[in-house]
Image (cartoon, rainbow, N blue to C red):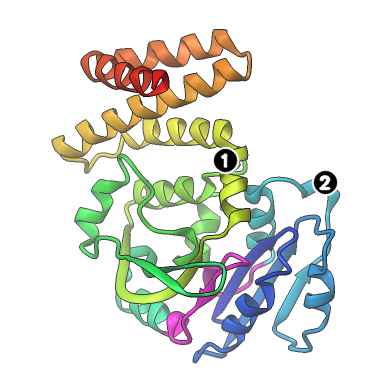
Amino acid sequence: MPLVSAIMTIRNGEAYLAEAIDSLFAQSLSDIEVVVNDNGSTDGTQAILAGYQDSRLKVLPVDSARQGSFADGISRAFDHAEGTYVAVLDSDDVAHPRRFAAQVEFLRSQPDVGLVGSAMQWIDENGKGTSIYRPEIDPDALAQEYAWSNPIPHSSVMYRRDLASRLGGYDTTFKFACDYKLALSILNAGYKVASLPDILVRIRQHAGRVTRQDEHSLMRNHDKLELMASAQSLSFLDARARVLGRRELVKTAVHYARDLVCAGRVHEARIISRDGRRRDPMYYLLYAGYQALRGNR
């Protein structure tokens, strides 16, 4: 059984796949397996994967019954992972050579932490750094942020496999926010979530990634709304976090209702708008009015 399972799901990612896989096999901690789910690629992805001779690579062939969303793909990769710890890397990102060693060391020393991420660097299509993001490193302060966001990038996380399995793994009903759901489940189970201050992953921003996000705006807003509503029940939230969470819920409700109207689902839009108004009537009026003014410009 390997110490770390690195999991990845990919569809038509030939442009950056080799760099991502190479960064996993270049880890200073070598007791790993790399589990890659092919989520229906039609480009050169399969040929690139077939070119690796490393026995630690486990490629899952296309499964039409579980082919579709990111959640379907990453859940399938997780189901085939055998490591004590599971690390995630997207197929267009790059892991620092010491990432796994640092995260394993931290989880071993902090048994009350169920999931750990890290600081990250945004890079462009050519691998040039553009900016740096550092999540809050105090676990108690970090936990508050889950009321209004998913503050740790999924491509930087490592978590305990047995814990995630007990919690049901990835909930594939959340097609674009299954990682947020998993983190909330870990927090609800009484474990902490943490982030290391070191930059241990480089996350790539490119045209294909932005396009995918735009295309699925409606489903993303649905997932975000559902999960932030669930996050409101976290027992440890302070008053500030609850207020910020409600306001982000209102913002998401406004955007989600707009998406529903554009999709011709007017009745659903009315229900979402009504729920947003109920949560914070004054803020709803202010934010909806601001968005309407922006739309008129």
User: Is residue 13 covered in magenta?
Assistant: no
Neighbour tally class for label 2: few under 14, some 14-19, many 20 plus, Cα within 10 Å: few
Q: Is residue 114 left or right of residue 1?
A: left
Q: Quadrant of the C terminus?
A: top left
In the picture as drawn, the residue positioned furthest to the front comes out as 297
Q: Is residue 50 above or below residue 244?
A: below
What's the magenta region? 81-101
Residue 205 horizontal/vertical position (percent)? 52, 60
Residue at the image point whose x is 75% and y is 60% from the top: 12
In the picture as drawn, the residue positioned furthest to the left comes out as 239
Residue at the image point whose x is 61% and y is 75% from the top: 20
- Per the image, the residue denoted by label 2 is 65
Q: Quick one: SS at disc 2?
A: helix
Residue 214's disc number? 1
**Residue 2 visible in image:** no
Q: Is residue 240 above or below residue 122?
A: above
Q: Looking at the picture, tell me which residue is in the foreground, 2 or 98.
A: 98
Residue 135's disc number? none
Q: Quadrant of the N terminus?
A: bottom right
Q: Quick one: SS at disc 1?
A: helix
Residue 224 horizontal/vertical position (percent)? 45, 36
First in residue order: circle 1 vs circle 2: 2
Q: Is residue 139 left or right of residue 180?
A: left
Q: Amino acid at mark 1?
A: Asp
Residue 135 horizontal/vertical position (percent)? 30, 61
Q: Looking at the picture, tell me which residue is in the foreground, 114 or 274.
A: 274
